[in-house]
């Protein structure tokens, strides 16, 4: 009976141990899936980016550098193309390509600055801006710039054009100085051949660079210049052929510059982006400044461990730093640097940098050479003083008394700093003294002392010490070797005048940069003014003040070239007195005013501009655009009568507003404003228009 009252118990499906284990894992599995979702998204994003990267870099040099209208997605098309215009598809920056190109340009720029030749015409401003995403082009450019660096070392563009009247005298002096006729002939053949080889290499490099830029019809001029250099005998081409060579070098560059401007007016032209050109020009400027800084610091290296300026060189170092930083600051503080300009102005601004960068290279090279020159002059003066002390001590004592190095401890320390032995110099002086005693002549003893001093000069100029050895094809090198090979008893050749002549020659050989330091610096400042004016005329009084200051100071700096008057004369006369050349007085004065004066000029420009900017800011002066000065503004601005802008609140026009009848105001029709009682017609300066809802 009890079983009748027992409710039937449904069969329960009890979980098995494996099912229990599965049920316990279920929450962990859900959590893991939730956590892996962002990771899957990142994975998909990486794969998508990789797919796009593989697509873009499949065959980089086979991709067309141009985009036709409609070839890009609408969201990527930022600006509307004009009819027939092509857009360059290359990115603004491709890291490894730009890096290789900048390394190549650095190689060429550094070689140009290291060269001791002087004169701006030797520097070719050849910089190709990348307008295509071709990876192969940059390697060709690397080869071109490296070749240009190899062929421009110690290159002089006037070679073969300007005659050298001292060539015969150099040959005679070298023969007298111990070189046999065969050595002299071989050396002269090499000296004549190297400029020709350099010219051929430059012609080939420039021709290849033009081919890289796809201007094959202009490359023919460079190859023609290469061909004519084979015409001539052992002495190279004639003067006429060398002049033709220079014309063929520069003519294609001018044609190429003009072609860029002509292309802007033709259908299908490629628009130039100001950002790309500004970035490339800034890179070129920084490369030049970096190479110049390396050259300047290279001059500092010669001061370490050598007897030169010592502590007296601190003002020179400070002046060089002020000059370097001054030009760096002036370039980036040029008014209108961030102005948006048209393609034509942008191109003109880019090519106008040739004037600025050429003058800048010459200026920075002159600064670097001046540092080495000042240090060299200090070392030579100390050597001359040490030997003159020994000679004067001997003259004040009995002629037969031998010299000893211990008598001159300061001179011993000086020669040790130079890596020379003063004891050996004393032995040479004693040998000259013995020869003078045998001949019973004080003049012979003094002639021997002069020859000993010249020998010390030659050792100091060696690459191991001050690295100022004269060029082997120069008249100075021939004179120095001839005097060193002269018999010490030849008092006619070995005299004080000969010593002063060699000393002046060494200074002029290494200090000639002083002659073009100030004109080049002034031209650099004026080049910045030109670049700023090409971008656009000054927009306010402050910019007019900056350009006016730079123009005035730059012109005054150029006029300092009058200090070069008389520089062709020897620096010292036969009696050791300085001639009337003012530029050499600045370069050789105790205060070393050559660089300090230029540093003061740069500091004056910086102070003037910064003070003017501070006063303009503190005075809260509003800048005016000079619209009332018709002689400053162009004809377009004078013809345009601008009216003051009037602003109004925007509104929405309802459908019923269109049912209202348009009101003829004799200057055009306009829909009324349903929310404002009155408003100004935006199409013309008319009276008040009454809204149809004004009565509501």
Image: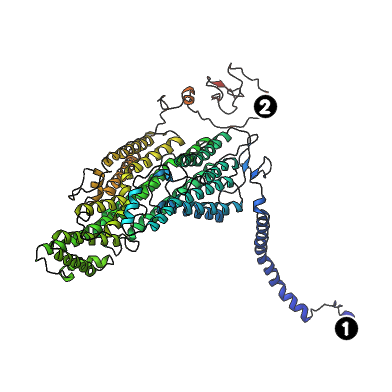
Residue 51 in the image, given as x and y percentages of width and height: 68, 57
Q: Which label belongs to residue 2?
A: 1
Residue 411 in the image, given as x and y percentages of width and height: 20, 65
Q: Nearer the viewer, residue 148 or 454?
A: 454
The image quadrant that residue 25 belongs to is bottom right
Q: Nearer the viewer, residue 678 or 120?
A: 120
Q: At x 20% / y 54%, what residue is drawn?
A: 492
In the rendered image, the vertical position of residue 174 relative to residue 420, given as above or below:
above
Q: Which residue is mark 2?
A: 656
Tell me if residue 498 can be seen: yes
Residue 613 in the image, given as x and y percentages of width and height: 35, 41
In the rendered image, the vertical position of residue 548 relative to residue 183, given as above or below:
above
Tell me if residue 357 can be seen: no
- Quarter of the image for the C terminus: give it: top right
Residue 222 in the image, given as x and y percentages of width and height: 54, 43
Q: Is 523 positioned to the left or the right of 274 in the image?
A: left
Q: Is 248 positioned to the left or the right of 656 in the image?
A: left
| Crowd around label 2: few <14 · some 14–19 · many ≥20 (10 Å) | few
- Quarter of the image for the N terminus: give it: bottom right
- Badge 1 marks a residue whose secondary structure is helix
In the rendered image, the vertical position of residue 68 relative to residue 379, given as above or below:
above
| Crowd around label 1: few <14 · some 14–19 · many ≥20 (10 Å) | few
Q: Nearer the viewer, mark 2 or mark 1?
A: 2
Earlier sequence position, callout 2 versus callout 1: 1
Q: At x 23% / y 62%, what residue is drawn?
A: 452
């Amino acid at each position: 009976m009890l079983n009748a009252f027992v409710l039937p118990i449904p069969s329960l499906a009890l979980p098995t141990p494996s099912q229990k284990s599965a049920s316990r894992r279920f929450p962990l599995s859900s959590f893991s899936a939730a956590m892996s979702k962002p990771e899957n998204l990142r994975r998909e994003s990486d794969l998508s980016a990789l797919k796009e990267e593989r697509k873009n870099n499949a065959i980089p040099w086979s991709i067309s550098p141009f985009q036709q209208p409609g070839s890009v997605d609408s969201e990527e098309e930022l600006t509307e193309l004009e009819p027939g215009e092509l857009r360059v598809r290359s990115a603004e920056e491709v890291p490894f390509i730009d890096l290789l190109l900048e390394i190549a340009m650095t190689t060429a720029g550094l070689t140009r600055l290291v060269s001791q030749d002087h004169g701006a015409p030797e520097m070719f401003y050849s910089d190709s801006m990348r307008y295509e995403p071709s990876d192969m082009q940059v390697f060709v450019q690397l080869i071109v710039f490296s070749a240009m660096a190899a062929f421009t070392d110690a290159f002089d563009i006037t070679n073969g054009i300007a005659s050298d009247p001292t060539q015969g005298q150099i040959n005679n002096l070298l023969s007298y100085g111990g070189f046999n006729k065969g050595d002299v002939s071989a050396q002269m053949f090499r000296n004549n051949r190297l400029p020709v080889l350099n010219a051929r290499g430059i012609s080939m490099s420039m021709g290849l660079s033009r081919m890289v830029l796809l201007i094959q019809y202009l490359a023919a001029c460079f190859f023609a210049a290469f061909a004519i250099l084979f015409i001539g005998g052992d002495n190279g081409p004639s003067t006429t052929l060398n002049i033709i060579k220079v014309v063929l070098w520069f003519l294609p560059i001018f044609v190429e510059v003009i072609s860029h401007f002509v292309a802007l007016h033709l259908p299908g032209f490629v628009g130039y982006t100001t950002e790309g050109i500004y970035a490339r020009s800034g890179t070129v400027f920084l490369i030049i400044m970096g190479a110049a800084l390396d050259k300047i610091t290279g001059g500092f290296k010669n001061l370490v461990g050598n007897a030169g300026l010592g502590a007296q060189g601190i003002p020179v170092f400070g002046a060089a730093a002020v000059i370097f930083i001054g030009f760096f600051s002036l370039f980036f503080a040029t008014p209108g640097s961030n102005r948006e300009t048209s393609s034509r102005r942008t191109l003109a601004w880019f090519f106008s940098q040739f004037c600025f960068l050429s003058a800048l290279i010459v200026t920075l090279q002159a600064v670097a050479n001046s540092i080495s020159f000042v240090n060299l002059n200090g070392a030579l003066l100390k050597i001359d003083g040490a030997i003159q002390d020994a000679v004067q001590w001997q003259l004040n004592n009995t002629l037969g008394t031998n010299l000893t190095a211990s008598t001159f401890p300061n001179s011993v320390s000086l020669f040790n700093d130079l890596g020379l032995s003063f004891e050996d110099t004393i032995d040479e002086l004693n040998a000259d003294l013995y020869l003078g005693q045998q001949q019973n002549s004080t003049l012979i003893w003094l002639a021997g002392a002069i020859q000993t001093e010249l020998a010390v000069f030659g050792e100091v100029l060696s690459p191991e010490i001050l690295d100022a050895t004269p060029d082997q094809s120069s008249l100075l090198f021939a004179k120095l070797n001839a005097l060193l090979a002269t018999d010490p008893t030849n008092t006619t050749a070995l005299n004080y005048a000969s010593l002063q002549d060699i000393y002046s020659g060494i200074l002029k050989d290494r200090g000639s940069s002083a002659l073009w330091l100030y004109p080049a610096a002034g031209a650099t400042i004026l080049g910045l003014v030109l670049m700023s004016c090409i971008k656009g005329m000054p927009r306010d009084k402050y910019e007019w003040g900056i350009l006016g200051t730079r123009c005035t100071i730059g012109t005054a700096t150029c006029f300092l070239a009058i200090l070069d008057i008389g520089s062709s004369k020897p620096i010292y006369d036969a009696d050791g007195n300085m001639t009337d050349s003012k530029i050499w007085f600045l370069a050789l004065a105790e205060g070393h005013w050559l660089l300090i004066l230029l540093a003061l000029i740069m500091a004056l420009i910086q102070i003037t501009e910064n003070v003017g900017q501070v006063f303009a800011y503190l005075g809260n002066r509003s800048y005016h655009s000079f619209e009332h000065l018709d002689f400053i503004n162009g004809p377009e601005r004078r013809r345009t009568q601008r009216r003051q802008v009037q602003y109004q609140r925007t509104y929405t026009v309802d459908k019923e507003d269109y049912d209202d009848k348009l009101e003829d105001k004799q200057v055009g029709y306009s829909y009324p404003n349903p929310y404002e009682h009155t408003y100004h017609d935006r199409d013309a300066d008319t009276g008040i228009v009454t809204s149809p809802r004004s009565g509501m």
